[in-house]
Image (cartoon, rainbow, N blue to C red):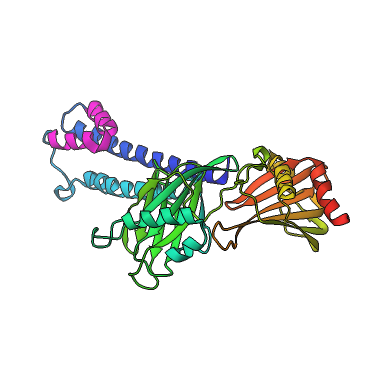
Amino acid sequence: MSELAMGSTALIAAMAALLAAASLIMGIYVYRDAQRRNMPALRWALIAAFFPALTGFAVYLLTRRPRSEPLKNGGRDWALIFVTAALVIIPCLLLFLSDRLVRQRDSGLRVKQFGAGGALTIDEYCEQVDGATAEKVRAWLDSLPTVEDTPFPQVCMLRYDASYRGEPRQYYLAALPHTGRNPVLSIDKADGLFYSGIKLNVIACTGLGGEHTLASFAVSGGTPDRMMAKIIWTEHETRITRVDYNPTTLNIIPDYSSADPSDRSLNLPKRITIRRYSSEGHIGSSQHSFESETLIEGRMEIFNLLKALDSAEYMDFSEAGGQTYSDLFIVHAEYMSRGKNPVPLETTVFWVTIGKESGDCIVQLDDFYGADGFRKAERSLYARLRALFDN
């Protein structure tokens, strides 16, 4: 069991213990108090302990008979005072533990933030996408509510569903109203006990006013139940419109193992840089030294290499992690923007080596969403990379 799962189990156990303690305290008090009032003690104790939301305890207090003996200690029911205090403290502890449990919960959602350069002005955005996309997004922006139409700034989004390397993802373009030229922006998971969510936090660092700024991000690992935005102090749900084109500055990378190289619209990197390293090290560490570098720019050569990398089968970390190696190749696939003047935006990195213990050709992929795990490739892939430097 993982450390996170163990922590969540401990919190749930603590919450269950508090609920049991509250029921026990109420049951014991009612049982003893009912005996002093000549009432069915066991029946009322069970009602008080097991009826939800304190209803049984409240009904007992409202319907109980007068005591057969007067109260001692100044006429105060200290037992009732203790029970009342416990019933105030226990819910506070439950709320605290619930908050801790929510913070530990992991819905599995992953967020790739921003793409190129964080939040962009409209002109900057249009330089990094194709003309047809820019025209559609401008028309969408013109249709959005103005600051005069709504009592508070509202974040609106376009959503596009696509597959990234065979895994479903949602791509979002967020229009941030009147947040200045360079707003401070972060995108975080906001998971609750019964929902998974994403929240945009927007702080205008140049003052309110001006046009929208646009931010691209993508979500993988599932579909969020809630999408919230907080601009300065105001938090509200966003307005999402689904579209049939990619409105973001993010590149959507196909699974090259099943792609058609004759498709001219196939998204391929502009170039691939391969660096060779040599030194004893462990897979998953950075203990290596640079030797030399080569460049690949031919379309079919790029496609064939990416196809071999994407065709590698996933393997457990236990099979790959910690194995030693002597030669290492780091493959940088550099993707460009879709605009009139393409500029490098994103790089997918593959680490290719031979594990000494297993003799397997091991590939580690670091994609835009972070480390993607280890894969096992044909040894011919390693030989192909060596040949690039040996010739």
Asked if the magenta segment contains residue 48, the reply would be: yes
Question: In this view of the protein, which residue sits in the foreground, 356 or 307?
Answer: 307
* Residue 107 visible in rendering: no
- Picture quarter containing residue 344? bottom right
Q: Is residue 179 above or below residue 71?
A: below
Question: Residue 380 in the image: x percent, y percent?
Answer: 82, 42
Q: Residue at image x 24%, y 44%?
A: 79
Question: In this view of the protein, which residue sits in the foreground, 130 or 102?
Answer: 130
The secondary structure that dominates the magenta segment is helix
Asked if the magenta segment contains residue 275, the reply would be: no
* Residue 115 visible in rendering: yes
Q: Residue furthest left?
A: 66
Question: In this view of the protein, which residue sits in the foreground, 34 or 220?
Answer: 220
Q: Residue furthest bottom?
A: 206
Question: Residue 21 in the image: x percent, y percent?
Answer: 35, 40
- Picture quarter containing residue 121? bottom left
Left or right placement of residue 148 versus residue 374 in this view:
left
Q: Residue at image x 37%, y 42%?
A: 18
Q: Residue furthest right?
A: 391
Left or right placement of residue 169 versus residue 41 in this view:
right
Q: How many marks?
A: 0
Question: In this view of the protein, which residue sits in the foreground, 4 or 339?
Answer: 339
Left or right placement of residue 327 versus residue 180 in this view:
right
Question: Residue 360 in the image: x percent, y percent?
Answer: 80, 42
Q: Give the range drawn in magenta.
A: 41-63
Where the N terminus falls, by quadrant? top right
Question: Residue 275 in the image: x percent, y percent?
Answer: 77, 59
Where the C terminus falls, by quadrant? bottom right
- Picture quarter containing residue 349? bottom right
